[in-house]
């Protein structure tokens, strides 16, 4: 499929134009086209948006490689493998790019053409609710879906811009294409992006220091999960400095200066202080589209903005920045545009952090001792799959209503936590009670058993842990 130019679609009219080809925009376009509408997608960069190009695909591939490198090093240290590891980072990055191109080609050459979706290369701006201007060419549309994603946030730190120009400071996007492994990498920001990239580069051999201004890493996740990951990271040699703020970055001296006055030398500095909605240059204000306090496009549960025929999906609608929500928002937008009443429920969005080990959470977070909740922790270290996989660490934690015994939340650190969480989403959505756990039999040995085992403990059923006296 050859991408169209704005000139190629001059004079055309569409039922829907999606601005952005990431998960949300593609889902909206494909669903609407599948329901018989004439659809186009406008993309100013590479197809696939954040998830394909600088998110899901490259980070998960690099995490996979770094984990496998770690496994080989572990086996070598135990004498199980008699060989020396020599990392070929150039080949690794090349393979990462091949995988990205593979996903892009799948949609460009097979998926979009099969739905007769026009894919236009160019910069789109909303001229009015029924007109998209693409590189000075006006195109008519009955509906618009804004799916322009997000951009890395750059904090106000003295010397940051100069350090970026010199290549001493990287954003999370640029950290996915390094040509050599830094001896020491400082990561400013201990959120999801920071801990994932800490796992990648630590696995490749870098010494890592994470600097987080909040009292803990992963400040938006469950406290127990955050504490557990910190302990595991530190046991691996990853240095974590919480309650610390960077005052200055000095590329000449190759150091970061904290507000305390302490300076830390480093080969590179990675800024991982989050992302923000990408809304610049879209003409939103002129079109009358309402923005929220953080620059996000406000939408209802139909993915609709305050303009009835304009929708927004994905990161551009604000936190949480997860592709799973973007996909559902896109499907809902496509259905509403096609005349099908459709809505999504954002109250149960699972969060998954693909660090090593993984962290996940959904629903209510509470600490033991809160009279409103039953809180029970099960050590993932005793799970047979964790033991056999040489990953005997982590915790699974349930939160239930103290009166009704209804499951309200689940949080986990450990192997495959990103997969286990999905079972909890279904259980919470179906208002499962913890005494119903005996009705369910999972395969064995799998990490998702930890979800059931934590509930078994509440019911006094224990087949893994020593009896408490």
Image (tube, rainbow, N blue to C red):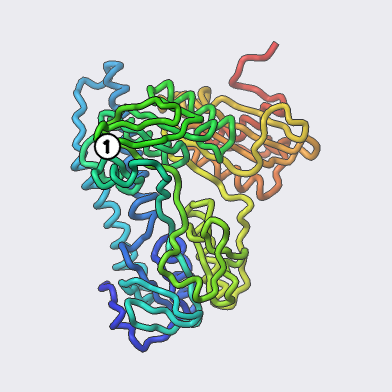
Q: Give x and y (percent) for residue 16.
A: 46, 77
The total number of labels drawn is 1
- Classify 10 Å Cα crowding around label 1: few (below 14), some (14-19), many (20 and above): many
Toward the viewer: 314 or 29? 314
Residue 71 visible:
no
What residue is drawn where x is 28% and y is 52%? 99
Question: Is 113 displayed left or right of 280 in the figure?
Answer: left
What residue is drawn where x is 53% and y is 63%? 297
The residue to which callout 1 is attached is 251
What residue is drawn where x is 48% and y is 80%? 128
Task: Name the outermost residue toward the top.
Answer: 469
Q: Secondary structure at mark 1?
A: loop
Toward the viewer: 467 or 144? 144
Place residue 123 in its image quadrant. bottom left
Q: Quadrant of the N terminus?
A: bottom left
What residue is drawn where x is 59% and y is 76%? 308
Toward the viewer: 146 or 297? 297
Asked if residue 151 is positioned above or below residue 193 in the image, the reply reads below
Asked if residue 266 is positioned above or below residue 46 in the image, the reply reads above
Q: Quadrant of the C terminus?
A: top right
Question: Is 22 displayed left or right of 463 in the figure?
Answer: left
Q: Give x and y (percent) for residue 25.
A: 44, 66
Q: Give x and y (percent) for residue 347.
A: 64, 52
């Amino acid at each position: 499929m050859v991408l169209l130019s704005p000139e190629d679609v001059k004079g055309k009219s569409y039922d829907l134009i999606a601005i952005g080809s990431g998960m949300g925009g593609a889902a909206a376009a494909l669903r609407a086209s599948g329901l018989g509408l004439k659809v186009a997608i406008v993309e100013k960069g590479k197809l696939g948006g954040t998830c394909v190009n600088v998110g899901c695909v490259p980070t998960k591939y690099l995490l996979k490689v770094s984990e496998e490198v770690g496994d080989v090093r572990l086996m070598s240290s135990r004498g199980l493998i008699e060989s020396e590891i020599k990392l070929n980072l150039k080949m690794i990055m090349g393979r990462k790019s091949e995988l990205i191109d593979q996903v892009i080609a799948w949609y460009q050459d097979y998926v979009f053409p099969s739905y007769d979706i026009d894919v236009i290369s160019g910069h789109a701006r909303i001229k009015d609710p029924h007109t998209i201007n693409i590189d000075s060419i006006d195109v008519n549309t009955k509906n618009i879906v804004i799916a322009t994603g997000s951009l890395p946030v750059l904090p106000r730190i003295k010397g940051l811009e100069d350090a970026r120009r010199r290549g001493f400071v990287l954003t999370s996007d640029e950290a996915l294409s390094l040509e050599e492994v830094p001896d020491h990498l400082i990561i400013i920001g201990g959120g999801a992006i920071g801990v994932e990239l800490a796992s990648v580069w630590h696995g490749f051999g870098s010494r890592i220091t994470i600097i987080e201004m909040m009292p803990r890493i992963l400040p938006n996740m469950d406290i127990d999960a955050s504490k557990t990951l910190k302990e595991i990271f530190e046991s691996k040699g990853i240095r974590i400095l919480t309650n610390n703020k960077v005052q200055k970055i000095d590329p000449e001296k190759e150091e970061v200066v904290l507000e305390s006055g302490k300076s830390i030398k480093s080969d590179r500095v990675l800024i991982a202080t989050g992302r923000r909605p990408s809304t610049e240059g879209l003409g939103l204000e002129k079109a009358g589209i309402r923005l929220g306090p953080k620059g996000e496009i406000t939408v209802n549960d139909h993915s609709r903005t305050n303009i009835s025929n304009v929708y927004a999906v994905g990161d551009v609608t604000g936190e949480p920045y997860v592709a799973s929500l973007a996909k559902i928002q896109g499907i809902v937008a496509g259905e509403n545009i096609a005349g099908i009443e459709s809505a999504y429920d954002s109250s149960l969005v699972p969060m998954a952090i693909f660090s090593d080990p993984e962290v996940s959470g959904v629903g209510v977070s509470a600490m033991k001792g809160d009279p409103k909740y039953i809180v029970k922790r099960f050590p993932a270290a005793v799970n047979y799959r964790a033991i056999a996989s040489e990953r005997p660490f982590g915790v699974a934690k349930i939160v239930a209503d103290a009166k009704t015994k209804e499951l309200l939340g689940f949080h986990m650190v450990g192997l495959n936590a990103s997969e286990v969480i999905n079972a909890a989403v279904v259980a919470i959505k179906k208002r499962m009670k913890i005494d119903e756990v005996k009705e369910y039999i999972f395969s064995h040995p799998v990490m998702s058993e930890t979800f059931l085992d934590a509930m078994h403990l509440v019911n006094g059923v224990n087949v893994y842990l020593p009896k408490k006296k």
